[in-house]
Image (cartoon, rainbow, N blue to C red):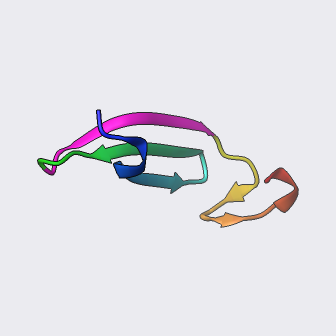
Amino acid sequence: MIKATDRKLVVGLEIGTAKVAALVGEVLPDGMVNIIGVGSCPSRGMDKGGVNDLSQW
């Protein structure tokens, strides 16, 4: 394990009309990516690719 200050993290975020999903990965010294976290939840206030109700955010 690498010290926390030396870790290279990358995050992917997908905001869709049906759900919001996130993925966190750590770039290892050999260039590989180790997935360290994933999550998703239903979207609210989105319709046809746009925000239609800010009170839902």
Residue 21: say if magenta: no
Query: Image check: 1 left or right of 45?
Result: left
Chain part drawn in magenta: 31-41
Q: Nearer the viewer, residue 44 or 30?
A: 30
Q: Residue furthest bottom?
A: 50
Looking at the picture, how far across and down is residue 13, in whole percent?
Answer: 49, 54
Quadrant containing the N terminus in the rendered view: top left
Looking at the picture, how far across and down is residue 26, in whole percent?
Answer: 32, 44
Q: Residue at x 38, y 34 (%)?
A: 36
Q: Residue furthest left?
A: 30
Considering only vertical position in the picture, is 41 above or below 49?
above
Magenta: main secondary structure equals strand
Q: Residue furthest right?
A: 55
Q: Residue at x 59, y 45 (%)?
A: 18
Residue 32: say if magenta: yes
For the image, the number of numbered tags is 0
Query: Image check: 3 left or right of 21?
Result: left
Q: Nearer the viewer, residue 46 or 14?
A: 14
Considering only vertical position in the picture, is 44 above or below 49?
above
Q: Residue at x 79, y 54 (%)?
A: 57
Q: Nearer the viewer, residue 54 or 2?
A: 2
Looking at the picture, how far across and down is residue 41, in whole percent?
Answer: 62, 37
